Image (tube, grey):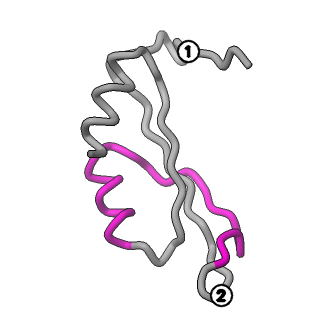
């Protein structure tokens, strides 16, 4: 499913995809890395699950097919 999302987003001209998940979610972190995402930051005590606060990892994937030299190809039109 993630690979399909990447394909569709690139076909629509999107340059960057972002994801976030709790740091303990190692399988999802590995899957995202396999699909070209990189960890770019984290938020401390940001996710609250089952009475416990968790740190959240921020990931992003920049397309190699869309976008110009450092510029996104899509914008939000409010």
Decide which of tag 1 and tag 2 comes sooner along the chain.
Answer: 2
Position of 51 relative to 32 (above/below): below
Q: Which residue is mark 2?
A: 52
Cα separation between marks 1 and 2: 37 Å
- Answer with left or right where residue 27 lies relative to residue 40: left
| Quadrant for the N terminus in the image | top left
Q: Give me the residue at 47% from left, 23% from top.
A: 15
| Quadrant for the C terminus in the image | top right
- Tell me, yes or no, whether the highlighted magenta stretch contains residue 39: yes
Position of 24 relative to 39 (above/below): below
Q: Which mark is residue 21?
A: none
Q: Are marks 1 and 2 in contact (CB under 8 Å)?
A: no
Crowd class of label 1 (few under 14; some 14 to 19; many from 20; radius 10 Å): few
Q: Residue 22's spot in the image, x, y percent?
A: 53, 70
Query: Secondary structure under badge 2?
Result: strand
Q: Residue 24's spot in the image, x, y percent?
A: 47, 78
In front here: 59 or 51?
51
- Answer with left or right where residue 51 lies relative to residue 19: right
- Answer with left or right where residue 66 lies relative to residue 40: left
Q: Residue 9's spot in the image, x, y percent?
A: 39, 26
Q: Give me the residue at 60% from left, 80% from top.
A: 49
Q: Give me the residue at 49% from left, 30% from top.
A: 16
Query: Secondary structure under badge 1?
Result: loop
- Tell me, yes or no, whether the highlighted magenta stretch contains residue 11: no
Q: Which residue is mark 1?
A: 74
Magenta extent: 26-48
Crowd class of label 2 (few under 14; some 14 to 19; many from 20; radius 10 Å): few
Q: Say which quarter of the image contains residue 71.
A: top right
Q: Residue 74's spot in the image, x, y percent?
A: 55, 15
């Amino acid at each position: 499913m993630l690979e399909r999302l990447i394909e569709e987003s690139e076909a629509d001209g999107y340059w960057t995809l972002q994801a976030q998940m709790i740091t303990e979610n190692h399988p999802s972190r590995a899957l995202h890395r396999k699909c070209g995402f990189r960890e770019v930051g984290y938020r401390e005590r940001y996710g609250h699950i089952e009475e416990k606060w968790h740190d959240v990892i921020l990931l992003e994937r920049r397309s190699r097919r869309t976008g110009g030299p450092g510029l996104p190809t899509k914008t939000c039109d409010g």
